[in-house]
Amino acid sequence: MTPTHTSASDVVVEARDVTMAYGDVDVLRGVDLDIHRGEVFALLGPNGAGKTTTVEILEGFRRRSAGDVRVLGTDPERGDDAWRGRLGLVLQSWRDHPRWRVAELLAHFAAYYPDPREPAELLALVGLTDQAGRQVNRLSGGQRRRLDVALGIVGRPELLFLDEPTTGFDPEARHEFHLLVERLAREEGVTVLLTTHDLVEAERLADRIAMLVGGRIRAHGTPAELARRAAAQAEVRWTADDGTPRRERTGDPSRLVWELHRDADGPIAGLEVRRPTLEDTYLHMVHRAADGTDATADGEARAA
Amino acid sequence: MKGTHMRRYRRAGLQRGGIELRQLLRNPKELSGHLTNVAVALALAAYIGDDVPGTQTPMAHLVLAGFAAYLLFQIGLVNLPQMLVTEREEGALLRLRATPGGIPAYLIAKCVLVVGTAVGTLALLLLSAAVLVDGPLPHGPGGWLTLLWVTTLGLLAVVPLGAAIGAVLPNPREALALIMLPTMGLLVTSGAVFPITSLPVPVQQVASVFPLKWMAQGLRSALFPDSARAAEAAGSWELPMVALVLTAWAVLGSLLAVPLLRRAARRESGSRLSARHRKAAQSGAMPG
């Protein structure tokens, strides 16, 4: 699907057949990932799909059960301080340092890195210049998350993790946050791994999306590729002679409709041809995983 | 290369300790927690008129020396664990874990904060007592030296232990409840506020296992005239025993603290943090 002829140094994250089991519960059942330098990569999936587990394995916070992982050329389980310094993290539920002042906190965390960004510039980048002297626990949710982003990139990381960054945001805060991520990727060249359960957010921000459902990557590619692939199998619905509703998926709906007409020798009751959107495909996958009818065979879902 | 990193982390740690000390001074609520002890000690000292039985030492002095020891004890075993648990819950520990050199810097900062708080409150207590209620000050260089080593060793006895406790306690509210009761029990039974000899022998023996009794005894030896040792349980200051018990607690605390802190830091991850915040939000205990 994606061209794999990029050089090794362009691959920032490489995961092969990663599994994770807690007791007898399989959370990840063989995840493969390739994330390239400079791209915004979205790991899309419903809650409980294994997104956070995947990200924590990549961050070196969790030991995988099996599989190979390289993040910036290093196995995260053996990552040292120098390696940590090349990563930036923005987690969902940080409420730390509530009594620090915004600029003070940013300047302090700059002190850990050999070549940090200028705190004042960083505040301007994330739009918190006016809040520089404010105490951290007086920030709004959106401001707090933007401060987390500033703290995440103060050490000029090569890879930035954003774990469900817009959960609980109002539409305006979400919009501003999206603009910030786009600016980081386009102007600052930061590689971003974003997790989200929101397809719209993934389509909007990501160069490439991997859909993680039920502990497996079910599909991956650019948003356009995924949409094209989703639409490749059209769904034809009609009502059979005996009155039962019929549904069939096919890559060639025109032929199927022609065949139906030929067999019926007349108009077809309730005939409908639909091209599924990416959202249809995503929801279909999520529902099937939730129903437990979680077979490996995608598509070809015939029903009578 | 490694050296420059360590220098940077040390600088970050010292800077962090300084900022946290300043925040403590700016925070009236937390500051009053430390000042209350000083005020209570001064009030008791002003109120009590008797002498320690069998000596010319005012009972007020015994209370002041006892509270001085208790200040150190409380900073190490109550304030420090509470701080560690709170910062773990908020995610500060996780952020520092994700930062190169964050954990060493954190430990340095906590040392700065603990030593700063301890020295500050101890000096405040002894000086204000000396000025306001004719409290005791060390006699001569020997007394100051004893004050210095008992304070240092006393902190070393309780700080690693407090760090170990802070690493295993579940959350700030339960932490306080779990620690306060035994601490107050020791305050009463360790001879810090009245002579230990007035307590039943089994109680004395239990209290002798813990550091507070020895910290108070060591401070009395630093602050009192030598004649006052007649009122001690053994009839002497037992300074070698003070050093031995406090050192033993320091060693035990360190043996526990290092692996427990490492485990606490390693266990932190984003999902654990959010799970805890969800639980706290459900119980309505933590502001959204």
Image (spheres, coloured by chain):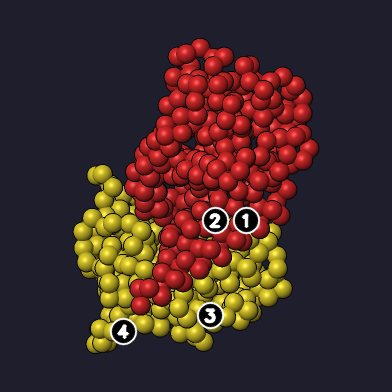
Answer whether residue A235 is visible to the viewer in this image. Answer: no
What residue type is disc 1 on? Leu
User: Callout 4, which amino acid?
Assistant: Asp
Q: Position of residue A159 (x, y in %)?
A: 41, 75
Whether residue B166 sits left or right of residue A100 in the image: it is left
Marked residue chain, label 1 = B
Q: Residue at x 56, y 65 (%)?
A: B15
What residue is disc 1 on?
A: B21
The residue carrying mark 2 is B112
Labels 1 and 4 in the same subunit:
no
Please give left or right for residue B286 compared with residue A80 in the image.
right
Horizontally, residue A21 falls left or right of residue B206, namely: left
Query: Where residue A262 sits: x, y (%)?
Result: 28, 74
Q: CA distance from mark 1 to mark 4?
A: 45 Å
As helix, strand or loop, the secondary structure at mark 1 comes to helix
B193 w.r.t. B155: above or below: above
Q: Residue at x 44, y 19 (%)?
A: B205
